[in-house]
Amino acid sequence: MLASLNSQKGTALITVIMAMLVVMLLGGAALALVTSQTKTVIGFEQDINALHVAEAGLHQYLWYMNKEGGTLNLGSEQNPVLYPDAAPRGAFYLEEVQKETGRVIVRSTGWMLADPASKRVIEAVIVRRTFTEYVYFSDDDPENIWWSSSDRCYGPYHTNSTLRIAGSPIFYGRATYAEGLEYNPSYYNNPQFRQGHAKVSKIPFPSNNNQLKTIAQNDGYLYNGRTSIKLNANGTVTIRNKNSSPVTRPLPSEGVIYVNGTMSSNMFDINAGNAFVSGKLNGRLTIASSNDIYITGYDPTNYNFNQPEATDGISYQNTGFILNETTGVVTVTGSGQDMLGLVAQKDIGILTRGWFNNPNTDSARRNITVHGAIMAITGSFKNTHYDRYPTSPAGTLTVRGSIIQKTRGAVGTFNQSGGTIVTVTGYAKNYAYDPRMMYDNPPHFLKPENSGWEIRSWTER
């Protein structure tokens, strides 16, 4: 009996010890799990904070780009910039991966001082705001101008007034407006905004192009009175001022030609500050005028329309464009170096009626191409005779670049038949963006007043 009792006591003791071991093992596992989770949470928090420090580095670079004076400390891995200045908890250093006019790629590496091995790296494209970042920019859209079902906007769009929709246009880039979005109640409206749309603040519009006149006077070509300019594929320009003989010259060193003169509604007025431009550009150039600019379908330096040389507008010699009409993506072909700017104080028109020796002749080409950034400061980009020429059939106006205007102008007239928009007179529009202009501009092209730098995109490396 005693032996049996002792045996039971021994068994109970072993059971207690085993239970204690199990409890200790479970407790240890729980402690290890809690410790591991705590480390994971701390590590995750440190990782997120390291990303915030890297972002702070980018914002410091952006602040430097937008302020006047001072110096920028890029830092290095061995001697980083501490953040914040007071009681720093993190560190970062910056690298300028690529730096060019109007565009900088910056890489920021950040980490926490408590965990220097855990680094986050982000890379951003920082650009200076320009008008040419839009394929289509209007300071004021009249109440009778609508985007219709036949319209395709292949690139970013902005208006400082109201975006008006009458049908189902497609905006392949982001669309922004300063006042509002309005739908025509007489149409079935179903616009497509492939990259969204938003109401934003107004972008200040310039009042004149006098700074280009100053540049032309000092380091470019300055002409007084009516001037015709033919762009040549060999990198020269042929210029005819008033009734003088044509002269061929190299492109100006600063890339600016300015035509000065009186203000006149007569496009062929010999004293007016009007420029007539056509041909094939090989290089970089900005042409500005104190009055109007006319894009012609023929050589404008030949006043005799009995023997015209067709040019079909303005194109580039070494740079081409391929538009994917499904995605709206424009691919640049060739060397990609040619770039033109046209900046008129008043209007920029496609000349479709009249010539120097015959103001009543039909001077329209069926199809016109325009490569470049076009800015009409107080007027419009338009067809000079949109309600008449060309007709039977109408033509197509192809633009690859950027259109900036005070007021949106007309290039043709249209009818809607059975849900289909038909061009009756003038030109149907085929406008697409030159993607280089997101980061690059023609020589000395005008920028918004007080234009600053902004982060256009960023990715983590």
Image (cartoon, rainbow, N blue to C red):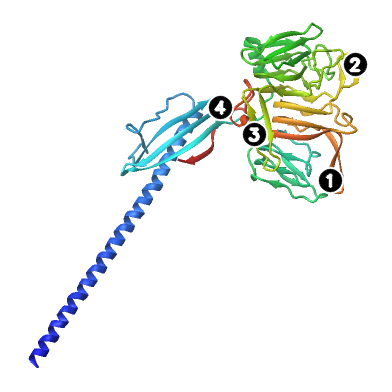
Q: Which residue lies under the disc numbered 4?
A: 102
The Cα–Cα distance between marks 1 and 2, rounded to whole angstroms, is 37 Å
Position of the C terminus by quadrant: top left
What amino acid is labelled 1 in the image? Thr
- First in sequence: mark 4 or mark 2? 4
Q: Quadrant of residue 4?
A: bottom left
Q: Is residue 41 left or right of residue 409?
A: left
Residue 5 x, y percent position in the rendering: 11, 89
Q: Which residue lies under the disc numbered 3?
A: 331
- First in sequence: mark 3 or mark 2? 3
SS type, badge 4: loop
Q: Which residue lies under the disc numbered 1?
A: 420
SS type, badge 3: strand
- First in sequence: mark 4 or mark 3? 4
- First in sequence: mark 1 or mark 3? 3
The label nearer to you, 3 versus 2, is: 3
Q: Quadrant of residue 149?
A: top right
Q: Which residue lies under the disc numbered 2?
A: 358
What amino acid is labelled 4 in the image? Gly
SS type, badge 2: strand
Disc count in the image? 4
The label nearer to you, 4 versus 3, is: 3
The Cα–Cα distance between marks 4 and 3, rounded to whole angstroms, is 21 Å
The Cα–Cα distance between marks 4 and 2, rounded to whole angstroms, is 45 Å
Q: Are marks 1 and 3 in contact (CB under 8 Å)?
A: no
What amino acid is labelled 3 in the image? Thr
The circle on residue 446 is none
The Cα–Cα distance between marks 4 and 1, rounded to whole angstroms, is 42 Å
The Cα–Cα distance between marks 1 and 3, rounded to whole angstroms, is 29 Å
The label nearer to you, 1 versus 2, is: 1
Residue lying at the far front of the rendered structure: 334
Assess disc 2: are there few (<14), some (14-19) or many (≥20) residues with their C-alpha within 10 Å of its C-alpha: some
